[in-house]
Image: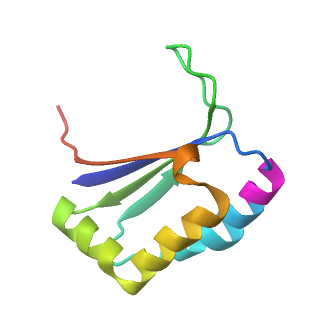
Amino acid sequence: MAKMTVIYTTPKDKEFFEKHYFEVHVPLAKQLPGLLKYEINNGPIISLTGHNDVYRVANLYFNSLDEMMESFKSDIGQQCAVDRMIFASDDEVQIYVYDSKNT
């Protein structure tokens, strides 16, 4: 299974972030071809290593990295990339993609 983890720092305008994220971005992202699951944090994020500027974490699941990459090449994938820049610049987000396995 492939996973995308998106880590957002605390936005300057939390109200705008929340409104846009939940009313525009999440519904758009849920249309990604091949998306199996979209999950976000529920409540505060507590760092055990001293990081204090993490506001929201999202995980998106796909069958494979190839499927994920193809999904983001789609029209919806391109719309997601453009839309994300409206509420979180590259300086305000970290995005990781990787294969995962159960151990």
Q: Is residue 90 left or right of residue 97?
A: right
Q: Observer-nearest residue: 80 or 47?
A: 80
| Residue 26 in view (yes/no) | no
Q: Give the main secondary structure of the magenta stretch.
A: helix
Q: Observer-nearest residue: 92 or 63?
A: 92
Q: Quadrant of residue 10?
A: top right
Q: How is the image coloured?
A: rainbow
| Residue 50 in view (yes/no) | yes
Q: How many marks?
A: 0
Residue at 56 percent of width and 14 percent of height: 50
Residue 10 painted magenta: no
Q: Quadrant of residue 69?
A: bottom left
Q: Is residue 71 left or right of residue 54?
A: left
Magenta region, residue range = 14-18
List x then y, in percent, for residue 33: 34, 78
Which residue is at the far top? 49
